[in-house]
């Protein structure tokens, strides 16, 4: 099914999505994107349905085509303090804060959101596969976060963050067993299934 250019006609909509919610390390990153009302793109879709090469090839096109776009970041220490759900909402709020055009409606990927100031919102389950603006936000959030984790990989190469982006792969968990935790791990998360004493 093709993606839709808008949820409500004649309204300035910002699509919002995040990346990195289920990771054991690194920040959660969100993006907010306002696209032209008649926008269409042959490749753009939910970032999880695109290859790394596709995501990287269209991210700059999204930035060029967008009326406004922004990225918000919430650190792993903030995640530990306020929990990952609240951190995801905060990352979206930080992205919307930076938009150069004020949206009249926020389209949120998922089923929950904490209202942003006086701007109404709609939560849309699997919205990144339904609306161009949310798909665009998913691509910008994912590519921005992947680049951050690749940079952190230079500092901590044992954990494979350039390929797993901090997600709980077998190799990542084995590295935690072998080398312990880094300053970038989320200590409020269950880092190992057996809950080893990590301190």
Image (cartoon, helix red, strand yellow):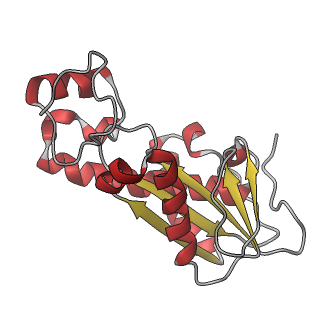
Front-lying residue, 37 or 42: 37
Left or right: 85, with 16 as reference point: left
Q: Splitting the image into 4 quarters, where does residue 50 fall?
A: top right
The quadrant of the image that shows the N terminus is: top right
Q: Residue furthest right?
A: 9
Q: Is residue 107 something one can see in this rendering?
A: yes
Question: Which percent across, then down, holds residue 86?
Answer: 50, 53
Question: Which percent across, then down, holds residue 96?
Answer: 58, 72
Q: Residue furthest top?
A: 194
Q: Residue at x 41, y 58 (%)?
A: 144
Front-lying residue, 11 or 81: 81
Left or right: 153, with 139 as reference point: left
Compared with 62, 186 (above or below) is above
Q: Residue furthest left?
A: 179
Compared with 48, 57 (above or below) is below
Image label count: 0
Q: Is residue 27 something one can see in this rendering?
A: no
Question: Which percent across, then down, holds residue 114?
Answer: 63, 58
Front-lying residue, 13 or 80: 80
Question: Which percent across, then down, holds residue 150?
Answer: 27, 49
Q: Splitting the image into 4 quarters, where does residue 160 fall?
A: top left
Compared with 150, 101 (above or below) is below
Compared with 196, 104 (above or below) is below
The quadrant of the image that shows the C terminus is: top left
Q: Residue at x 66, y 78 (%)?
A: 67
Q: Residue at x 24, y 42 (%)?
A: 185
Front-lying residue, 70 or 35: 70
Q: Residue at x 50, y 58 (%)?
A: 30
């Amino acid at each position: 099914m093709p993606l839709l250019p808008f949820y409500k006609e004649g309204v300035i909509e910002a699509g919002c999505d995040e990346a990195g919610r289920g990771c054991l390390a690194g920040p959660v990153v969100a993006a907010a994107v306002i696209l032209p009302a008649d926008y269409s793109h042959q490749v753009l879709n939910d970032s999880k349905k695109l290859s790394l090469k596709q995501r990287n090839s269209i991210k700059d096109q999204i930035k060029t085509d967008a009326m406004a776009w922004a990225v918000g970041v919430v650190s792993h220490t903030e995640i530990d303090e306020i929990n990952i759900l609240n951190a995801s909402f905060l990352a979206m709020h930080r992205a919307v804060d930076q938009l150069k055009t004020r949206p009249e409606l926020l389209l949120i990927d998922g089923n929950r959101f904490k209202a942003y100031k006086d701007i109404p919102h709609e939560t849309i389950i699997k919205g990144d596969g339904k609306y161009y603006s949310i798909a665009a936000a998913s691509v910008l959030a994912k590519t921005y976060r992947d680049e951050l984790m690749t940079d952190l990989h230079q500092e901590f190469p044992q954990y494979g963050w350039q390929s797993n982006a901090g997600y709980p792969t077998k190799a990542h968990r084995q590295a935690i067993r072998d080398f312990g935790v880094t300053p970038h791990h989320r200590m409020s998360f269950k880092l190992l299934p057996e809950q080893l004493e990590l301190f």
